[in-house]
Every structure is written in C-alpha cells, then in structure tokens.
Amino acid sequence: MPLAAFPKCFLEDMIDRRTMTNRDWLDLARDHLDVDGVELYWPTLRPFTDAQLDGLRGHADQAGLQLPLMCCSPDFTQLDRHAVEREVADEIQAIRVTARLGGTATRVLSGQRRPEISTDQGIELTVSAIERVLPAADEYGVTVVMENHFRDYFWSLPEFAQASDIFCEIVDAIPDDAPFGVQFDPSNTYVYGEDPLALLERVRSRIVSVAASDRRLVEHPGGREPTLLHGIVGAGDIDHEAIFAILEEDGFGGWITLEDGDDPTAGISDLQASAGFVRRLMARHHLK
C-alpha cells in the first residue's frame, strides 16, 4: 500500500500568494517526508501546457515520487445547465491531466449544498454528471473517486453530499463495474456528527483510496462553542486502528494520502509526524 501526502497546509501559498509551486511541493516531500508520492490540487496546475505537465512529471520522476491522485472539486449541484456542463468538461480535463502525469485516480464531489436545490435534485444532478465523465475515465485508464467531503477551498457552502445517506445513494447509483469508487475520509464524516466507521462499513467494497486525516475537539474559554480542528493524523479523535483493521481484512492495496492541519509554519513537521504514525499503522496491519 503506497503513501502520498496532500499540501493542505500550503494551499494559501500555492493559490493566493503564488509563492510556492508544485515543484516546490515535490522537493519538500522528497527531502522531508517518508512518502511514495504526492497528491496534487487541480487549481494549482492551471493554466498549463502539456509540455509543462510533462516537465512536472519528469521532476517527480527525478524526485523518486509518483503523482497518483488529482484532487478535483467539481460543483455539479447547480440549476444552470451551462454551468454544470462547464464543471463536467473541467472534470474530464482533470482526468486527462491525471493520466498524463501517470496518475490513477481523480477526485469527484457532488457540489455545494445550495438551499434552492432539493435532495432529489442534487442527487440527480450529481449522478448524471458523474455518468458523463466516466467514458473519459475509461478512455484514460483513470478511476473517478468520490470523497465524503466537507467543503472545498473555493466554496462558500458545504458539500451537498456531506450526509452519509446522500453520499451512499450517489455511490450506489454508479455501477460496480464502472471506473468509479470511493475515497474515504474519516474526519469529514466526524465533522458532520456521524460515525466514520459506520460509513466505512457501508462503502468498504467500493473504496479505492483513503485520505488519512484527523480532527480533535478543542474547548474554548468563556463559554464559546468548542471547535473541531484538523491536525496531525493520530493525535485526534478518529479511531485509525479500527479503520486500518477493516482495510487489512479487505486486503486493501490502494493509495493512502495524508492530510493534516492548515498551519504552514508547522506543515512539514506535522506531516512528518502524520507519515510516521500511518507507516506504523500500515506495518502493524500488514499493509505495505
């Protein structure tokens, strides 16, 4: 089972400030992290040329790292048909780029939880859009992985399919033999107030990749509401032992990708701690 890392803590530097590139991210991972590859965030690649993509893949090869996963966040839950078509086209482009970079999986989401979109409408819009990107996934040899998600970096509203029942209804609507599966993220389910292990049991036969993440409840003085903070994997409330026991039982051999906190000043040290924790879990559960 290979291990990758996602640059969550560096997204502001990569997107807003433009002070960090994907090549920089590869260099950091090569020099400081015990990982086999890195997950890329789709907006950090645009605009691009095929020559630039080939150069990035070559840089990864020289670093001894793979580029297996593309983190894409299509917003399908819109009543504007043309807007949905643009999202479908963008996801297809991301699939093509994933393949050119040597990757095997491109993430898909449902979209934002807009108040004017009913549950049935949102499910129908999402399933229809996913069905339209599957031929491209099949053509390029890439698996589309739907993540149980919270909210994308660019979104103002949370994920439409944040509730497990809605998420599973969408997943179940896509045939088992399609180039489609699940990227399971335990902390996103926890944030919604649901049990990550219960969701894992429901989707375990469809899991292609796993986002290793954690959350912990932080109390505040003065009667303020406690908050759930993203942080080092293994230092929060997620029962990773139970999750990895299920993965071991199922003979899981896909990618695990690390995702921890938002603080860039602690980014590499936190990712190092997360990688060490997950590597120990992998060894303990014979997932190597």
Image: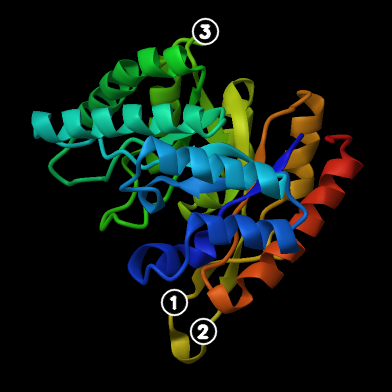
* Amino acid on which disc 2 is placed: His
Q: Position of residue 241 (x, y in %)?
A: 79, 46
Q: Which residue is drawn at the image coordinates 61% and 70% (left, top)?
A: 267
Q: Above or below — where is 226 with respect to 79? A: below
Q: Residues within 10 Å of mark 1 (few under 14, many from 20)?
A: few
Color style of the picture:
rainbow
The residues bearing labels 2 and 3 have C-alpha atoms spaced at a distance of: 48 Å
In the visual, does 263 lie left or right of 258? left
Seen in the picture, residue 282 relative to 206 is either above or below; the reply is below
Quote the CA–CA distance across marks 2 and 1. 7 Å
State the SS at label 2.
Answer: loop
Amino acid type of the residue tagged 3 in the rendering: Asp
x, y (%) of residue 158? Answer: 32, 52
Disc 1 versus disc 3: distance between alpha carbons? 45 Å
Using the image as rendered, state which of residue 104 and residue 64 is in the foreground. 64
For the question of whether residue 38 can be seen, the reply is no
- Badge 3 local density, few (<14 within 10 Å), some, or many (20+)? few
- Nearer the N terminus, badge 2 or badge 1? 2
Image quarter where the C terminus lies is: top right
Residue 55 location, x and y as percent? 51, 43
Tell me, for residue 177, which label it has, or none. Answer: 3
Give the residue at x 10% y 29%: 81
Which numbered disc, 2 or 3, marks the residue that appears first in the sequence? 3
Residue carrying label 1: 225
Helix, strand or loop under label 3: loop
Horizontal arrangement in the rendering, residue 287 relative to residue 53 (left or right): right
| Of marks 1 and 3, the one in the foreground | 3
Q: Which residue is mark 2?
A: 220
What residue appears at the point 31 percent right and 38 percent down from the top-left corner? Answer: 74
Nearer the camera: disc 2 or disc 3: 3
Q: Are marks 2 and 1 in contact (CB under 8 Å)?
A: yes
